[in-house]
């Protein structure tokens, strides 16, 4: 009986710490990474404004070559959208919400079971080429999901870095 009481006490304390900690965490998250690509903005932009463009450099596509992608809407530009089914990368959908040719592509990303997030790839002149910044922000309202928001930069940041490295290679070596 004493062991059961101790186990229940420890379990209750752990649940209290997890939930109490979640109450103190912000539900908002932001992830951002940048790279300078030695190529003009136009050479980079052509890989950003469509689903086939993202497929050439996107790290998630490379992680699951069997990913089933379905395109919808216009072929490129604002309104271009795609959804995917993937055993290893999860299921989701993405829609380009605004474009400024050779300057910016904004998107909405919806991963199954999570609230949508907003992101953008911006292109700015930089010494030696074009600075590309990939950013994304969102909100996790569920108490347990706040822990995901807390770690989002560490979870998604490396994928952004790998994707930007792929984009750099593709743009610099067409």
Image (spheres, rainbow, N blue to C red):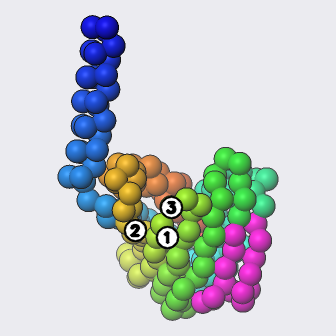
| Kind of element beneath mark 1 | loop
Residue 106 placed where, x, y %?
Answer: 50, 81
Q: Report, in whole angstroms, how far the alpha carbon at label 2 lies from the one at label 3.
A: 10 Å
The reply to whether dot 2 and dot 1 touch (C-beta < 8 Å) is yes
Horizontal arrangement in the rendering, residue 147 relative to residue 61 (left or right): left
Q: Which residue is pictured at 69% across the width and 69% down the height?
A: 83
What residue span does the magenta drawing correspond to? Answer: 69-83
The reply to whether dot 2 and dot 3 touch (C-beta < 8 Å) is yes
Residue 59 placed where, x, y %?
Answer: 61, 56
Q: Which residue is pictured at 44% across the width and 65% down the height?
A: 35
Horizontal arrangement in the rendering, residue 133 relative to residue 68 (left or right): left
Residue 114 shows which numbered tag? 3
Chain-order first, disc 2 or disc 3 = 3
Relative height, residue 109 to residue 29 (above, below): below
**The one of 9 and 166 positioned closer to us in this rendering:** 9
The reply to whether dot 3 and dot 1 touch (C-beta < 8 Å) is yes
Residue 60 shows which numbered tag? none
Question: In which quadrant is the C terminus drawn?
Answer: bottom right
Relative height, residue 111 to residue 108 (above, below): above
Q: Quadrant of residue 152?
A: bottom left
Residue 116 shows which numbered tag? 1
Disc 2 or disc 3, which is closer to the eye?
A: 3
Q: Which residue is pictured at 76% across the width and 53% down the height?
A: 65
| Kind of element beneath mark 3 | loop
Q: Report, in whole angstroms, how far the alpha carbon at label 3 lies from the one at label 1.
A: 6 Å
Residue 138 shows which numbered tag? 2
């Amino acid at each position: 009986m004493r062991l059961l009481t101790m186990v229940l006490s420890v379990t209750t304390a752990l649940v209290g710490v997890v939930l109490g900690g979640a109450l103190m965490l912000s539900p908002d998250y932001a992830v951002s990474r940048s790279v300078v690509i030695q190529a003009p903005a136009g050479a980079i932009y052509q890989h950003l404004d469509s689903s086939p463009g993202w497929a050439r450099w996107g790290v998630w596509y490379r992680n699951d070559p069997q990913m089933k992608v379905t395109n919808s809407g216009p072929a490129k530009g604002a309104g271009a959208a795609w959804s995917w089914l993937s055993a290893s990368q999860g299921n989701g959908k993405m829609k380009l919400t605004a474009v400024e040719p050779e300057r910016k592509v904004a998107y909405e990303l919806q991963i199954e079971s999570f609230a949508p997030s907003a992101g953008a790839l911006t292109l700015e002149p930089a010494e030696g080429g074009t600075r590309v910044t990939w950013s994304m922000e969102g909100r996790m309202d569920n108490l347990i999901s706040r822990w995901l928001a807390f770690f989002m930069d560490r979870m998604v940041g490396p994928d952004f870095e790998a994707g930007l490295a792929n984009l750099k290679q593709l743009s610099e070596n067409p």
